[in-house]
Image: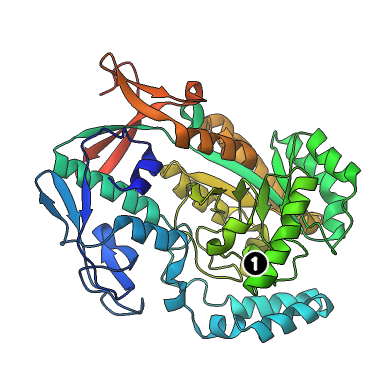
């Protein structure tokens, strides 16, 4: 059984599910799998270097069942990692992205950015993001490719083993159907100064959030500011170093910056990190000393760096837990799309709740100080509060999600006296669930006294 599948579900290690991978070619590209899921990687079946091909190679007929084992034409762990790490992006870049990714272009932009009037800056951004609705992959407004693949790998391996039902450790504590986190990136002095008022707004709806603060150059970070955030039950994290857009420009330079970032993390006792502008370079994350990161986006059609990790669940990048952003940023919704309603967020929330995933938000105090933007944000909070209460959703701080997901990763599901039991620190908060093969997809059900 692939380790990625065991980690995702926390299935009993002794359960008789087996998957093997055929020897793949060295060519890397796109292909389709069951239910038209787009994959990227090597396959014994054909692949396409371009996603805009009329017909992608179809590997959905290639899986075979041999002696109770599922044989796939590709390595499932490789495909999942390629998607989470956005390795497909080299074959997806469009003309504008290719130009914008040039270092000299980015350097000029960040040099003059602060001098540009807000209206002109937003016009330039709208031009860059003008193709956001037409992009084929990841899927808008939420992409579940990685989650679809986990479900399909489990379903097919159950079919191969002749198993109808598999126990696993439920995704969230106390059987919560899904999880929600709110985060605030503080980008300017005005945003810093609005922080106390924003905390008051959040608290009026029973919401706690994390504040990601830039430690250098943008504004001062006095101890009283940090203490007030924590004293009111909120969380304090590090946001980049100076937010100049060059964090991942060169590896040698990055290592120097990462060292300083880690020092700030220790100084402020911060466990979480988010890069400026949601830039990321997962292959370099071993330089960070944080417990968790929040720089990846589920689908990044409206982010400076396009792509997306294609999952609505946390996952580990080495020792660091990644908490992906699974909804659109407030700036993107209000100032790029120009939508002053919460309709898009409601649509994204509906989709994520159907998959029991992580609903994560970024709202900037820098923009919410304006009356119109603040009104939309309060509409969102009102909707979230009703949803949390009516559906018993787990509203958590990012650090609490980090602690839970790490504890869950160490729990084991074992059979004692004919019954399944969860063992490990924190097991009292965990719940057993069952994945049942119903037709062409899995169904999840929390265990009851009459569990299968």
Model colouring: rainbow
Residue nearer the viewer, 24 or 206: 24
Find residue 227 and report its horizontal and vertical position in percent.
Answer: 85, 39
35 vs 275, left or right, is left
Position above or below: 54 against 415: below
Position above or below: 451 against 118: above
Find residue 60 and report its horizontal and vertical position in percent.
Answer: 20, 61
* Residue at x-position 33% and y-position 24%: 414
Q: Kindly identify which residue carries mark 1.
A: 338
* Residue at x-position 34% and y-position 55%: 77
**Direction left: furthest residue:** 67
Residue nearer the viewer, 398 or 133: 398
231 vs 207, left or right, is right
* Residue 432 at least partly seen: yes
Find residue 299 and report its horizontal and vertical position in percent.
Answer: 50, 62
Q: For the N terminus, give its image quadrant.
A: top left
* Residue at x-position 67% and y-position 85%: 105
Q: Residues within 10 Å of mark 1 (few under 14, many from 20)?
A: few
Number of disc labels: 1
Residue 32, by quadrant, is bottom left
Residue 388, by quadrant, is top right
**Direction top: furthest residue:** 417
* Residue at x-position 12% and y-position 50%: 65
Residue nearer the viewer, 119 or 65: 65
Secondary element under disc 1, as helix, strand or loop, is: loop
Find residue 202 and report its horizontal and vertical position in percent.
Answer: 74, 40
* Residue 374 at least partly seen: no
Q: For the C terminus, give its image quadrant.
A: top left
Residue 158, by quadrant, is top left
């Amino acid at each position: 059984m692939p380790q990625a599948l065991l980690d995702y579900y926390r299935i009993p290690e002794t359960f008789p599910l087996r998957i093997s991978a055929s020897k793949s070619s060295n060519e890397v590209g796109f292909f389709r799998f069951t239910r038209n899921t787009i994959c990227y990687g090597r396959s014994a079946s054909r692949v396409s270097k371009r996603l805009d091909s009329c017909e992608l190679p179809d590997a959905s007929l290639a899986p075979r069942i041999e002696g109770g084992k599922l044989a796939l034409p590709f390595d499932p762990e490789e495909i999942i990692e390629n998607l989470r790490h956005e390795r497909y992006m080299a074959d997806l870049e469009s003309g504008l992205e290719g130009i914008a990714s040039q270092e000299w272009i980015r350097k000029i932009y960040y040099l003059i950015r602060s001098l540009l009037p807000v209206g002109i800056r937003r016009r330039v951004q709208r031009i860059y993001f003008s193709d956001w609705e037409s992009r084929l992959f990841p899927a808008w407004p939420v992409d579940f490719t990685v989650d679809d693949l986990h479900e399909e790998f489990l379903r097919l391996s159950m079919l191969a083993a002749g198993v109808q039902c598999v126990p696993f450790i439920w995704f969230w504590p106390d059987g919560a159907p899904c999880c929600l986190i709110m985060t605030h990136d503080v980008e300017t002095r005005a945003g810093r100064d609005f922080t106390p008022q924003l905390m008051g707004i959040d608290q009026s709806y029973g919401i706690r959030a994390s504040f990601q603060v830039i430690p250098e150059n943008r504004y001062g970070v006095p101890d009283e500011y940090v203490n007030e955030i924590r004293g009111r039950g909120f969380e304090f994290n590090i946001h980049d170093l100076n937010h100049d857009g060059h964090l991942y420009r060169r590896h040698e330079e990055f290592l120097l910056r990462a060292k300083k970032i880690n020092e700030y993390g220790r100084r402020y006792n911060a466990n979480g990190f988010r890069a400026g502008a949601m830039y990321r370079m997962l292959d370099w994350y071993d330089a960070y000393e944080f417990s968790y990161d929040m720089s990846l986006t589920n689908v990044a059609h409206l982010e400076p760096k396009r792509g997306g990790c294609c999952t609505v669940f946390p996952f580990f990048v080495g020792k660091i837990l990644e908490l992906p952003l699974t909804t659109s940023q407030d700036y993107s919704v209000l100032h790029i799309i120009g939508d002053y309603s919460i309709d898009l967020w409601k649509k994204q929330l509906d989709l994520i709740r159907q998959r029991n995933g992580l609903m994560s938000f970024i709202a900037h105090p820098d923009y919410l100080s304006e009356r119109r933007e603040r009104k939309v944000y309060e509409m969102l909070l009102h909707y979230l509060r009703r949803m949390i209460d009516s559906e018993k959703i787990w509203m958590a701080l990012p650090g609490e999600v980090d602690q839970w997901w790490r504890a869950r990763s160490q729990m084991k599901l074992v059979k004692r006296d004919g019954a399944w039991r969860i063992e490990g620190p924190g097991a009292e908060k965990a719940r057993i669930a069952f994945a049942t093969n119903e037709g062409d997809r899995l169904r999840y059900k929390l265990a009851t006294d009459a569990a299968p």
